[in-house]
Amino acid sequence: MRLELVDAATPFGERIRTGFRYPLRGSAPLAIVAITLFEILAFFPGARLLITGLGWVAIYAYAFECLRRSADGYADPPEVALESQDRTGFALVVIQVTGNAIAVLAPILLGIPGLLVSIAFAFVLPAITMSLTFDGVLTALNPATWIAVIGRLGSHYMALFGVVAFTSLLQSGAQYAMNDRGPSFLGMLAYFAIANYLTVYNFHLMGALIHHRHETLGYRPESEELVEAFHQDDDTALLKHVNDVARDDIPAATDILTDRIRDGIAPAPIHLRYRELLRSQQRQQELLVHAQIWIAALVVARENRRALGVVQDTLDIDPAFLPDAPTTCGPLAEAAAHGGMIRLAAHLSAGYLRTWPGDAGAPHYGLLAARLLERLDRVDDALALARALLHDYPEHPLVPDIADLLDHLATGTLP
């Protein structure tokens, strides 16, 4: 069976818009219809409260599985499962039923203060529900967690709450129009169907928001783990195939890896083998081009240490090599300096200033280069660079620091 996945980068606004189709996909319609038909038994006298309560439990249990599945990056709802399998699902049902009870009873018992309590609980309820997915029961019940989740999600959470509040109004309107004012049996049937549909939609949106902001929330979607595992297996087999091909035809083996790298993010062994094959054919220009692409990807992935290794390797090919963007070169200069790679850091920071003198970061990296040159006992070069910085950037906020360094270099005193 093919699993359809959702890109986590999809804007949340688009997920809100397209999410209305989610309850109509896969097994969701069957679940909604089954629960609705069960709930309609409440129309008949004898066990109305029990039937309604069990209906709530069933729809919340299924909706929570939809939330989890959406949070894990899957496009389709789960198979029909009307009971929760763990204490997290049980806690979710208890919390949702409690929330509904508070929403109904607090205004009746406490008047205006009760209405405020009901609104406040409704506001934090999505945060509690989502926290159950990635934090567990005890953490999700901690008010500090609610504040943290709402703070991390910011405007996205406000958008989610707006949708939940709007759908709650729709449910209330449906209850008034179809259940209270319409034909009693058909009205109740229509109300339950609409309420269940909107419940699945709301929980899907909670999961979609977790998936969209999973890095901020510290959650690892299951779909990413599966994709990574499949890619690892595929790439291991691909490397074996490439090595077999390379015994007789190195250019053909190189072409195979070229296609793999163009397909998307590839693991380090693919890139390293690709560079080995290029180097064995003396294809220096392609090595330089590949280095630029891989270094930029590594910096984006925050793998600066590996990126610095690629820079060092490429400098053996072209001593003047430099990453081709300030957003790549700057972080690597800082990382090299902090990692004690003084010569490499001096090369990168001086290259930054030389290549992008008009960039806002140029004076900072020029000052860094001057300090590194001093550490390399190239005091004359450091002096010349500091003087050039004062001349070229006379109004920059770093001028006092540059002047202090220049005075230190000229007099030999501590800066």
Image (cartoon, rainbow, N blue to C red):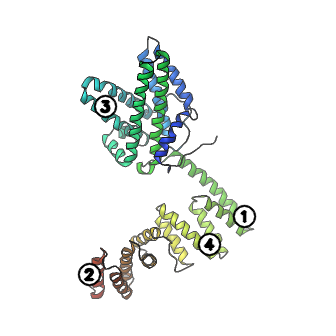
Label 4 secondary element? helix
Q: Earlier in the sequence, mark 3 or mark 2?
A: 3
Discs 4, 1 touching: Cβ within 8 Å = no
Q: Could you give the CA–CA distance between mark 3 and mark 2, rounded to whole angstroms?
A: 64 Å
In this figure, which residue is indicated by the disc labeled 3?
Answer: 118
The disc labelled 1 sits on which kind of residue?
Val
Q: Is residue 257 left or right of residue 318?
A: right
Which residue matches tag 4?
Answer: 286
Quadrant for residue 411, please give it.
bottom left
| Lower position in the chain sequence, tag 1 or tag 3 | 3
> Mark 1 near mark 3, Cβ–Cβ under 8 Å?
no
CB contact under 8 Å: marks 3 and 4:
no
Above or below: residue 98 compared with residue 404: above
Residue at the spot of label 2:
414
Left or right, 7 with respect to 395, comes to: right
Comes first in the chain, label 3 or label 4: 3
Local crowd size for mark 2, using a 10 Å CA cut-off: few (<14), some (14–19), many (≥20): few
